[in-house]
Image: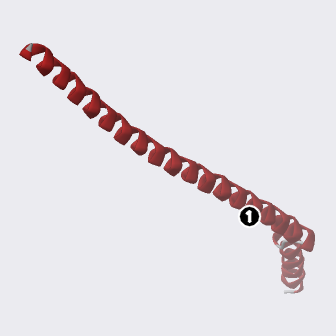
Amino acid sequence: MMKATKLAVILVAAGLSVGCASKGDITNLQTQIDGLKAEVTSVKSTADEALSAAQAAESKAAAAEATSRRTATEVETKLNAGFKKHMLK
C-alpha cells in the first residue's frame, strides 16, 4: 500500500510538471495571438482598400460604357443622316 501511494505521488508530480503550461508558455502564446490579431487587422485593411478600388474601377467602367454607347449612337445618327443626304442627291 505504501509503494502504491509513493508511486501515485510520483506519477501525479510528473504529470503536473509535464502536463501544465508554464507562465512563459502562456506569455509566448499570448504574444503570438497578439501578432496574429495585428496581421489579421492589416489583411482586413488591405482587403477593404482592394474592394474600394474595385468598386471605383467598376463605376468608371460603367461611365465609360455609357459614354461609348452615347458616342456610338451619335456617330451612327450622323452617318445615317449623311448617307440619306447623299442618297437624295
| Residue 60: % across, % down | 47, 44
Q: The disc labelled 1 sits on which kind of residue?
A: Lys
Residue on which the image places disc 1:
37
Q: Quadrant of the N terminus?
A: bottom right
Q: Residue at horizontal 82%, vertical 65%? A: 29
Residue 62 vs residue 7, the one in the foreground? 62
On screen, residue 75 above or below 55: above
Q: Residue at horizontal 14%, vertical 19%? A: 85
Quick one: which residue is furthest to the left in this view? 88
Residue 21 vs residue 34, the one in the foreground? 34
Q: Secondary structure at mark 1?
A: helix
Q: Quadrant of the C terminus?
A: top left
Q: Residue at horizontal 36%, vertical 34%? A: 68
| Residue 66: % across, % down | 35, 42
Q: Around disc 1, counting alpha carbons within 10 Å, would you say few (fewer than 14), some (14 to 19), or many (20 or more)?
A: few
- In the figure, is residue 66 to the left or right of 46? left
On screen, residue 81 above or below 54: above
- In the figure, is residue 46 to the left or right of 75? right
- In the figure, is residue 36 to the left or right of 31? left
Residue 53 vs residue 19, the one in the foreground? 53
On screen, residue 82 above or below 44: above
